[in-house]
Image (cartoon, rainbow, N blue to C red):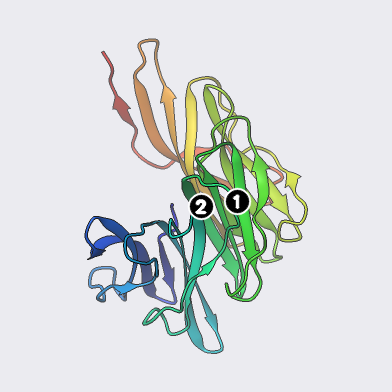
């Protein structure tokens, strides 16, 4: 889960897990700050019943009818099968309405929440599950009150759990998945011009060889460009030492091509004997 904090109109909005509601169990908490240092007391955003666990959270903030709306998405195990849920606040996060179910899974598996993106009342969420290689998504066009049936944005080769999504100004939807391609993980891109009714496979952001892993992508559309930042781990010698760093790539043509990945962090090395 990557999009747990947003800055909107000069205010920081943050969602996170806390055990302060019920000891030993995670609950979804929300808080905000005007300076990133001093924060409001947390408000409970999720509503799982006692004895149930909420996990992974993302946040989406938008303005509607003069009010700041805060949407919080999370997974929980209140039902027989773990599901993704969404709760909205129409007063800047002071209070949250009862959550609604987003996913429609008929079997049980742990959920790895991916990303959330939106443009006004149009919201898209992505996630994967422990059972395999599918990037799931659902969309809402009414501010999160109702959601489409869970569908597939991408089917990979092996075990894919990291993904994110972004919408551009023309409502084109992009889903980026860290795709396990057997002893290597590359960032694949799928694009939809109709909110996921149909998909087109675009150029991969990365194209690494064996023993390199690109994971935990986070995506943004900004100033008419698509941006993706992620972590890369790679085996840099024969004895199995691993290095890692943060990389960034951008596209100015709607994902048709991507810039050469740039490292934007220091590189750390984990030595193995």
Q: Name the N-terminal-most of marks 1 and 2.
A: 2
Which residue occupies the extreme front position in the image? 80
Identify residue for label 2: 81
Report whether 106 appears left or right of 14: right
Q: What element carries label 1?
A: loop
Q: How crowded is mark 2: few (under 14 residues within 10 Å), some or many (20 or more)?
A: some
Q: Which residue is drawn at 42% across and 66% down?
A: 6
- For disc 1, the marked residue is 106
Quarter of the rendering containing residue 120: bottom right
* Relative to 121, 271 lies left or right: left
The secondary structure type at the circle numbered 2 is: loop
Residue shown at the point (58%, 54%) measured from the top left: 165
Alpha carbon distance from label 1 to label 2: 7 Å
Where is residue 93? Give x, y as percent. 39, 78
| Whole-percent x, y for residue 240 in the image | 36, 15
Residue drawn at x 34%, y 61% as measured from the top left: 16
Q: Nearer the viewer, residue 240 or 139?
A: 139
Residue 115 lies left or right of residue 91; in this view the side is right
Residue 124 in which image quadrant: bottom right
Does 94 sit above or below residue 18? Answer: below
| Residue located at (34% from left, 19% from top) | 241
Camera sees residue 251 = no
CB atoms of marks 1 and 2 within 8 Å: yes
């Amino acid at each position: 889960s990557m999009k747990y904090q947003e800055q909107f109109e000069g205010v920081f909005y943050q969602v996170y897990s806390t055990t302060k509601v019920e000891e030993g169990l995670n609950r979804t908490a929300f808080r905000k700050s005007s300076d990133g240092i001093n924060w409001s007391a947390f408000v409970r955003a999720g509503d799982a019943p006692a004895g149930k666990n909420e996990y992974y959270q993302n946040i989406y903030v938008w303005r509607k009818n003069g009010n700041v709306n805060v949407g919080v998405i999370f997974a929980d195990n209140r039902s027989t099968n773990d599901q993704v849920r969404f709760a909205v606040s129409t007063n800047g996060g002071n209070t949250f309405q009862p959550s609604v179910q987003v996913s429609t899974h008929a079997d049980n598996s742990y959920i790895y929440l991916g990303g959330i993106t939106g443009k006004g009342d149009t919201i898209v969420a992505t996630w994967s599950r422990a059972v395999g290689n599918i990037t799931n998504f659902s969309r809402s066009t009414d501010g999160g009150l109702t959601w489409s049936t869970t569908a597939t944005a991408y089917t990979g080769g092996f075990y894919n759990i990291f993904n994110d999504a972004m919408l551009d100004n023309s409502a084109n939807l992009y889903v980026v998945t860290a795709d396990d391609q057997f002893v290597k993980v590359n960032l694949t891109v799928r694009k939809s011009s109709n909110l996921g009714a149909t998909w087109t496979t675009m150029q991969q952001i990365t194209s690494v060889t064996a023993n390199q892993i690109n994971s935990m992508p986070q995506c943004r559309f900004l100033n008419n460009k698509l941006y993706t930042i992620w972590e890369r781990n790679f085996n840099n010698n024969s004895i199995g030492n691993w290095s890692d760093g943060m990389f960034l790539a951008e596209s100015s043509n709607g994902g048709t091509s991507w810039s050469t990945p740039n490292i934007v962090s220091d590189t750390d090395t984990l030595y193995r004997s």
